[in-house]
Image: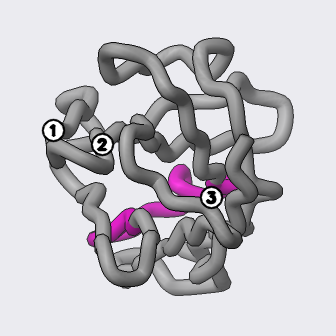
Amino acid sequence: QVQLVESGGGLVQAGASLRLSCASSGYSLQGYNMAWFRQAPGKEREFIAAIGFSDSSTYYPYSMAERFTISKDWLKNTVYLQMDNLKPEDTAVYYCAADRGEILRSSASEYEDWGQGTQVTVSS
């Protein structure tokens, strides 16, 4: 298991940008597939993006790729989610997840390790 901690959420106005961080506490992410999900109250957990930490391959649904970008930093052992042109419907708890599978996955049930989430609230 890896221990993941998300940060960077907050309250912003519509149209603003945020960069979320997912840091591994004392574990290397080499060989892991990393992903971001979000969950609004009363709704299903929604896939945003995934990245292979070693090879930098990425996977996004088309709707997410329009405004969100996933990236990583080897030296900081951290995964990021850049979010631009935020909208009220983006309000949710954002989660980082990790697995050691062979391919990038979009199903939350396939991920093994999760952070506790960071709240993003976008006002009109």
> Would you call the spot at circle 1 few (<14 residues within 10 Å), some (14-19), or many (20 or more)?
few
Q: Position of residue 43 (x, y in %)?
A: 74, 28
Q: Secondary structure at mark 3?
A: loop
Above or below 18: residue 77: above
Q: Range of the magenta residues?
A: 80-94
Q: How is the image coloured?
A: one colour
The answer to whether 45 appears left or right of 16 in the picture is: right
Q: Position of residue 122 (x, y in %)?
A: 58, 72
**Residue flagged by tag 3: what amino acid is it?**
Thr
**Residue flagged by tag 2: what amino acid is it?**
Ile
Name the residue nearer the viewer: 28 or 72: 28
Q: Which residue is labeled 2 in the image?
A: 51
Q: Position of residue 9 (x, y in %)?
A: 62, 77
Residue 85: assigned label: none
Q: CA distance from mark 2 to mark 1?
A: 6 Å
Above or below 124: residue 99: above
At horizontal 29% and vertical 56% (from top left) the residue drawn is 70
Q: Which residue is labeled 1 in the image?
A: 57
Q: Is 92 included in the stretch rendered in magenta? A: yes
Name the residue nearer the viewer: 48 or 55: 55
Which numbered disc flags the more N-terminal residue, 3 or 2? 2
Q: Which residue is labeled 3 in the image?
A: 91
Which numbered disc flags the more N-terminal residue, 1 or 3? 1
Picture quadrant of residue 102: top left
**Residue flagged by tag 1: what amino acid is it?**
Ser
Q: Is 51 included in the stretch rendered in magenta? A: no
Name the residue nearer the viewer: 66 or 52: 52
Q: Secondary structure at mark 2?
A: strand
The N terminus: image quadrant: top right
